[in-house]
């Protein structure tokens, strides 16, 4: 089944404790992206990747890191989480980043709480 | 910078009636795509419909249609014959389609639709 998977789905952690949210897609997509969703703000893009080893900042990259060493994986790293990073996080992928329309597939979301 | 505006935080509609969810956007780009997503209470993001900036006809997908008015920079979602299962959060989004531009995707704040029986 074609899908985007994220782990963990739920996480409660404390300020300053490094964490990684994994994202994997099995559709051979070039483009992958991370968003955070907060009430009243919709989804805001954190980072995106046009292809392996190519990443770029979105709207709200502060406090986050990403890497794209393999095409299928795009982990989101919070080196020192803070309470303002409490949010619902989505990973998404699409065939390519531009030129032609292609649907963006979303993962199920990761609800993160930083105490 | 691109900006997406959804002016209706919440909407109510009677079952079996049609409803229009508003979306306006701001961009100086000529080549872009407009998307609508549905987010039910379970949280997943479900793609509904897409409209390209150069598409001459309004997009339709089953009960969903997109009322695209390029000059007014609006891309309203029309849901016909509303069903109780349509109750959800709806997001409008836009993405530049040119490969040499940033291909980030911008979302509006969303509209929560409630379908009343």
Image (spheres, coloured by chain):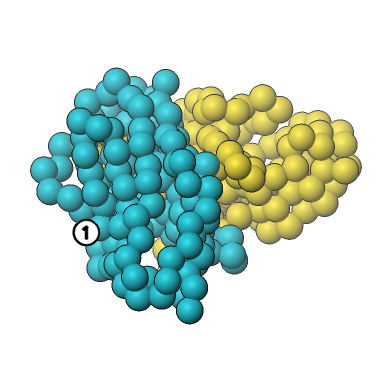
Chain colours: A yellow, B cyan
Q: Residues within 10 Å of mark 1 (few under 14, many from 20)?
A: some
- Give the secondary structure at mark 1: strand
Residue A90 shown left or right of residue B92 in the figure: right
Q: Which residue appears at 71% of the width and 27% of the height? A: A63
Residue at (42, 54) in percent of width and height:
B37
Report in which chain the residue with disc 1 lies. B
Q: Position of residue A17 (x, y in %)?
A: 86, 38
Q: Viewed as shown, does residue B66 lie left or right of B44?
A: left
Place residue A82 in its image quadrant: top right
- Foreground residue among B106 and A105: B106
For residue A36, side relative to residue B117 (left or right): right
Q: Which residue in the rendered view is the most extreme toward the bottom?
A: B117
- Say which of A92 and B58 sits in front: B58
Q: Residue at x 36, y 36 (%)?
A: B24
Q: Position of residue A105 (x, y in %)?
A: 43, 53
Instruction: Tell me if I can see residue B40 in this picture.
Output: yes
Q: Is residue A38 above or below residue B102?
A: below
Q: B14 or A95: which is nearer to us?
A: B14
- Which of the image's four quarters has the N terminus of chain A? bottom left
Residue A100: horizontal and vertical position, in percent? Answer: 23, 40
Whether residue A30 is visible, yes or no, is no
Residue, x 52% and y 28% (percent of image)?
A: A58
Q: Is residue A26 above or below residue A64?
A: below
* Residue where numbered disc 1 is placed: B60
Quadrant housing the C terminus of chain A:
top right
The image shows a total of numbered marks equal to 1
């Amino acid at each position: 089944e074609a899908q985007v998977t994220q782990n963990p789905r739920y996480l409660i952690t404390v300020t300053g404790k490094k964490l990684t949210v994994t994202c994997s897609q099995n559709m051979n997509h070039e483009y992958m992206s991370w968003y955070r969703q907060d009430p009243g703000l919709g989804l805001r893009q954190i980072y995106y990747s046009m292809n392996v080893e190519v990443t770029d900042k979105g709207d709200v990259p502060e406090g986050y890191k990403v890497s794209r060493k393999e095409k299928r994986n795009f982990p989101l790293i919070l080196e020192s989480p803070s309470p303002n990073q409490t949010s619902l996080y989505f990973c998404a992928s699409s065939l390519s980043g531009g030129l032609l329309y292609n649907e963006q597939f979303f993962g199920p979301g990761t609800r993160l709480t930083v105490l | 910078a691109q900006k997406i505006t959804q002016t209706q935080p919440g909407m109510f509609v009677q079952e079996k009636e049609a409803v229009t969810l508003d979306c306006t956007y701001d961009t100086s780009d000529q080549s872009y795509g407009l998307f609508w997503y549905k987010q039910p209470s379970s949280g997943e993001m479900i793609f509904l419909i897409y409209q390209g900036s150069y598409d001459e006809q309004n997009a339709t997908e089953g009960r969903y249609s997109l009322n695209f008015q390029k000059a007014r920079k609006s891309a309203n979602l029309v849901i016909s014959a509303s069903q109780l299962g349509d109750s959800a959060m709806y997001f409008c989004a836009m993405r530049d389609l040119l490969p040499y531009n940033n291909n980030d995707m911008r979302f509006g704040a969303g509209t929560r639709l409630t379908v009343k029986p």
